Amino acid sequence: MTAVPHLQIKNLRAKIEDKEILKGLNLEIKGGEVHAIMGPNGTGKSTLASTLMGHPKYEVTDGEVLLNGDDLLEMEVDERARAGLFLAMQYPSEISGVTNSDFLRSAINARRGEGNEISLMKFIREMDKKMKTLEMDDSFAHRYLNEGFSGGEKKRNEILQMMLLEPSICILDEIDSGLDIDALKIVANGVNEMRSADRGFLIITHYQRLLNYIKPDFVHVMMQGRIVKSGGPELAERLEAEGYDWIKEELGIEDETVNANV
Amino acid sequence: MSVDVQLRFGSEAITEYSKANQEPAWFLEKRLAGLKAAGELPLPALEKTKIDKWNTAGFDPFQTTAKIASANELSDLVKGQIDVDSVKNLVVQKNASAVFQAVTDELKAKGVIFTTLADALQNHGELVQKYMYQVVAPDEHKLSALHAAVVNGGVFLYVPKNVEVDVPLQAVYEVAGDQALLCPHVLIVAEANSKVTYVDTFVSGEGKDMVANSIVEVFVGAGASVQVASVRSLSAEVHDYSFRRATVDRDGKMEWILGEMNDGNTVANNTTILKGTGSNALTKSISVGTGSQRQNLTSQVQHIGTHSESDMVSKAVMTGEAVSILNGITKIEKGAEKANGVQAENILMLSDKARGDANPILLIDEDDVKAGHAASVGRVSEESIYYLMSRGISRQDAERLIILGFLDPVVSEIPVEEVRNKLRQALERKLG
C-alpha cells in the first residue's frame, strides 16, 4: 500500500430503531495515528464502531464517511473490510462448526482475491507466529470460532485476526474489557507491534488503563452522541484522575448519555 | 389402511429369481409370505407424513446387470464414490445384481465373512437364517413385507468373537433405469468383543419412478463395537425407504452416522435396541431438504438394559419448498435403571417456503434414569453473517461457512475420507 490511509467522518448521524445515537460526529484518522475515544457508558462509542463497520441494526441518517476518498457508507460490510477497515468487536459471534483456522484462511483469501490465495504452508507459518505473540495455545487453531472461548480468549482472537488481515484502519471496541492485567499487556503488545505509518487506529475504551500500554496520539471524549472534547494523552490522564464531571460542567451538560434531551 | 396397488410382479417372478440365485427353500418361503403380507398389511404409520401417494410398489423388482471382473470396470458413477486403487473390501450392487465384490485374504483368514447376501444364502445359509429378520420382521408393515418379497441384494458381514477389523468395509448401491428397484438387505453380526466399521453409499443413475427399499439389521455382541455410516444421494426420481435397526448386548456399542442427501422423498427409521447392561448407542444424522422433497426421518433408541446410554443428534438444513419431519424417540423401559438417554434435533431454515419439524419424544417407564432433549428450529443469524462479513468474507460465503459449520459435527465423524468428501460434495450440490 503506497498512499497513507485516511478515514474521514463528517457530521455522522445514526439511529437504532427510532432512537438517534450518533448526533453529528466528526473525526479524522490517518495512517500512523492512534486515536482514543473515551467516555462514560451510553454515549454512543460502540455505536460509532458498529456504524462504521456497517452493522445491519444501525441506520445512518446523515453525514458522510470516506475511506481513502471512497464513500464507505455505500459499501457492504465485506467490502468495507476488503477496503482495509477492521473492527475488533466487543462481543464477537460464536460460530459453531467453523474452525478458527478455516475461518481465518477464508478471510485472508477473501482479502487477497481469487487466484491469489495464500498457500497453506505460509498461512500456517503466519498464524503460528502471531499466535505465539499473543501467547495463544496451538489448540485455538482447531477450535470452533469463539465457541466456548472465555472473554479474554475472544479478545485475543480478535487481535489475532487483525494481525493476520493487516488492515489499514483498525477500530478496537473496548478490547480491554474483561481482561486481567497480563492479558491486557499481551493484547497491547500485539497492537503496538502493528503500529506503523500505513495504519491508523481508533481505540474505544472506558478506562485510561489501556492507554498506559497503547500510547495514543489523540484523545477524544464522547458525550451525547458526538465528540465534545479532544486533546493529547494528557486528556486521558486528567479523565482518569478527575472523571468526566469537569467536562460536563465546562460544557453545561447535565446528562452525558444519548437519551438526554439536547 | 392399505391402498391397492397393481403389482408389476407376482409369485412366479419371485420364484424364478430365487431359483436363479440358488436360494435355500426357507428363503423363498419368506419371500412368498412377504408377498402375501404385502397385500394385506398397511403402510407404516408415520408422524406427520402421509406416504400413501408415494411410489412404494410401482417397480420391476429384478432388473439385472452383468458382473464385472475388476474394480476398474465399475461405472463412473460408482467409481466416483470410492477410491478404486485403495479400497480392498467392497461390494457393489446395481438394481438386482451384485456386480462386483472383493475381500482380502487377510480378512478371510481372521474368519470374517464379508460378501453379498446371495452368496451368503448359498454358502452360510444357516448363519444367515439364524439372524435375518430377527430385529426387523417382514410382517411389521407393507414396506417390510414388500422388502421380504423382492429383496434383490445386500451384504452379509460376520465378525467372529474377539476379531477387530481395522479397515472400513464398503458397499455401493446403485439404482438406475425406469421403474428400477434397489432392495438390499444388510445383515451385520458382530460377535462378542469384536469391532467393525461398515460404510455404504447409495447413488442413482438415469431413470424414472425408481424405488429403494432397504433394511439393515445389526447384532452387536457383548463388548462388541459396530460403526455403520451411510450416505444416500439418490435423485428426485427415487422414493427411498430404509429401516435400520440394531440390537446391542451387554457393554456393546453401536454407532450410526447418516447423511441423508437424497433429492427425492425419503422415509428413514433408525432404531437401536439397548438390550444389555451398559450398552451404548450413538446416532448422528444430517439431512438437507431441497426442492419439493418430503422427508420423514426418525432416530429411535429403546433402553432395556440397566446403565445403558444413548445420544442422538439430528441436524437438518431446509431449502426450497422441502418438508422434513425429524423425530427423535427415546424410550426407556421399566427396569432399565440408571439408563441415560439424550437427544437433540436442530433444524436450520434457509427458506420461508420450507418446513421443518423437530419432534423430540421421551417415553419413560422407569424412575431411576436420566433423559434429556433439546430441539431447535432457527435461521442463520444475521449477527453471525455480519461478523464473518466484517472480515471480508462475502455474504454468500459467510452463509455457506455457517451452514457447513452447522453440519460439521456429523460430517467430520464419517470414518472413510472418500465418503466424507463425497458427503461434502453432496452438501455442496444440494446447497447450490
Image (tube, helix red, strand yellow):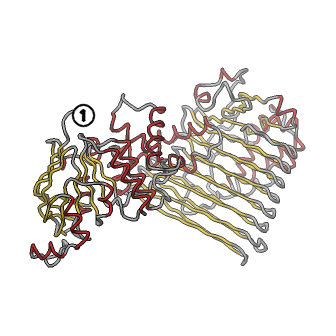
Judged left or right of residue B156, residue B176 is left
Q: Quadrant of the N terminus of chain B?
A: bottom right
- Identify the image quadrant of residue B370: bottom right
> Residue A203, percent across and down?
27, 56
Looking at the picture, how far across and down is residue A261, in whole percent? Answer: 12, 76
Rendered image quadrant of residue B50: bottom right
Quarter occupied by residue A37: bottom left
| Local SS, label 1 | loop
Tell whether B140 sits left or right of B235: right
Residue B315 in the image: state x and y as whole percent: 53, 55
Identify the residue under disc 1: A1
Q: Where is residue A12 drawn, in percent x and y?
A: 13, 58
Q: Chain of mark 1?
A: A
Residue at 40% across, 65% down:
A178
Residue at 78% over, 57% down: B248
Task: For residue B380, say whether it is visible.
Answer: no
Observer able to see residue B213: yes
Question: Image check: B167 left or right of A139?
Answer: right
Q: Is residue B363 above or below residue A26?
A: below
Q: Quadrant of the C terminus of chain B?
A: top left
Q: Which of the two residues, A179 or B46, is positioned nearer the viewer here?
A: A179
Number of labels in the image equals 1
Residue type pointed to by label 1: Met
Is residue A108 placed above or below A149 in the rendered structure?
A: above
Q: Between residues B146 and B226, which one lies in front from this camera angle?
A: B226
On the rendered structure, is B195 left or right of B143?
Answer: right
